[in-house]
Structure formats: C-alpha cells, structure tokens
Amino acid sequence: QSALTQPASVSGSPGQSITISCTGTSSDVGSYNLVSWYQQHPGKAPKLMIYEGIYRPSGVSNRFSGSKSGNTASLTISGLQAEDEADYYCCSYAGSSTKVFGTGTKVTVL
Amino acid sequence: QLQLQESGPGLVKPSETLSLSCTVSGGSISGSSYYWGWIRQPPGKGLEWIGSIYYTGSAYNSPSLKSRVTISVDTSKNHFSLRLSSVTAADTAVYYCVIDFNLYWFDPWGQGTLVTVSP
C-alpha cells in the first residue's frame, strides 16, 4: 500500500473556496466510496470532517464538502476562514479491512 | 460520549517492545459495535494506520507493520493495547488510539502520546 497523494500546500484568502485533492488507485479510492477527511491543528489530535466521501459528522460546518471522481477524492472548503488553517489528511479504505492515509496538505489562510 | 486516553512509557530503547494502552470511558468496549484502532504520526510527518481490533479479538493490521504489531483487547478493564516489537528510531511518533467506525473511518481520537525510541 502506498500513501495517497495530496498537494503539500494549498492557500486562499478569507471568503474564498479551496479544494484539496487526494489521488489514489483503483485499489483504494477508485474502488470504494469510503474516503474520510481529517483536520489537524498544531499539537492537536486530528478531527473527522468528512466520512464515506460526502457526509459531514454532526457539528462540522457545511462549508466543508467532499466529492470523488475516479481515483481522486476532493475536499472543498468554501468561505475560507482563519480557523480553517490547519493540516488536512484524506484516508481511504483499501480492501481486506485495511486503510491508507494521504500525505497531508497544509492549508494557509492568507 | 465515548472518550479514549492513551497511556504508556514515553521512552523505549531500540530493539525493545513498545507497549501502550488505551482506556475507554463513557461506554463499554464489549457493548459497542465498534472496532478499536491505533494510528501513529512521526514528528512533522503524516498519519499511518497501524491496526484495529473488535472486542471479540478479531484484528486487522497494516501490511507494512503486520509482523511487529500485536493489538489486544481486555474487556474486563475496558481497554485495548498495542505492542510493537523490535523498535527503531523510525518508530518514534505520537501514537493515537481511535474508534475505527465500521473499519471505514476514525472518530473520535484520543489526545495522543509521544513515544521516543532512543538508547
């Protein structure tokens, strides 16, 4: 299993929308609608933001949305806010009860 | 609401075995239809899934760590544990215990505990 590929960094101004990509293979992202996304602020534990590709847990802002096309999943943050500055990780089910994480993306709010 | 808390030594010597426990509060391990997992994060690096276990003992581990990892569950103490053998400096990381929901996503997470491998 190889880590899913994410851009190292993405930036945007307050109020803008940004999209983080997460590219895998036909053995993981492409085969299952089971991508999850996590937000991690410095020194903190990650927090679930999206599960099963498109669903938001209770309490997560509707400014966060997920999608998938082929072997690439995406997380879009609309109406970017200062508090969204963090690291973001995708994770996909990879069959045989295993999971693989993405390489992580640092989001900077300009 | 279920909460998780990691505990264990913060320093392990190379070639020895790393041992961590995760205590579950707010509910029973055996009364929950969840998997219980471990994830680690080396300093300044990304996340890596280590493995997950059901309260019956059915466990699944990362292929890359499989030969060194043992995850176990103790329902009487309402905790689950991680053992990682033959550690090297590359195993230095923050280790998180998590609920592995349906074996598909992780929520919630413990606060994490830093384990350093050093002589």
Image (tube, rainbow, N blue to C red):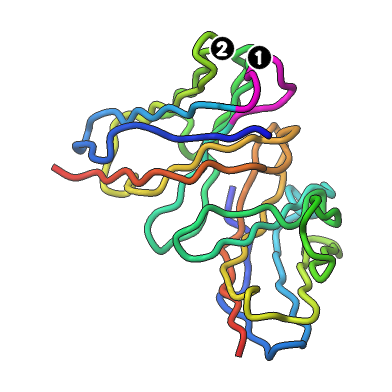
Contact, mark 1 vs mark 2 (Cβ under 8 Å)? yes
Foreground pick, A45 / B115: A45
Label 1 sits on a secondary structure element that is: loop
Quadrant showing the N terminus of chain B: top right
Q: CA distance from mark 1 to mark 2?
A: 6 Å
Residue B73 drawn at (x, y percent): 53, 17
Amino acid at circle 2: Thr
Label 2 sits on a secondary structure element that is: loop
Residue B112 drawn at (x, y percent): 45, 45
Quadrant showing the C terminus of chain B: top left
Which residue does the numbered mark 2 point to in the structure image?
Answer: B75
Residue B16 drawn at (x, y percent): 23, 30
Residue A96 drawn at (x, y percent): 70, 32
The residue at 55%/31% (across/down) is B61
Does residue A31 appear in the picture of this structure? Answer: no
* Lateral position of residue A37 relative to residue B111, left or right: right
The residue at 63%/80% (across/down) is A82
**Magenta stretch: dominant secondary structure:** loop
> Would residue B78 be counted in the magenta stretch?
no
- Report the chain holding disc 1: B
Count of numbered labels shown in the rendering: 2
Which numbered disc covers residue B98? none
Which stretch is magenta?
Answer: B26-36
Amino acid at circle 1: Ser
- Report the chain holding disc 2: B
* Lateral position of residue B83 relative to residue A63, left or right: left
Which numbered disc covers residue B30? 1
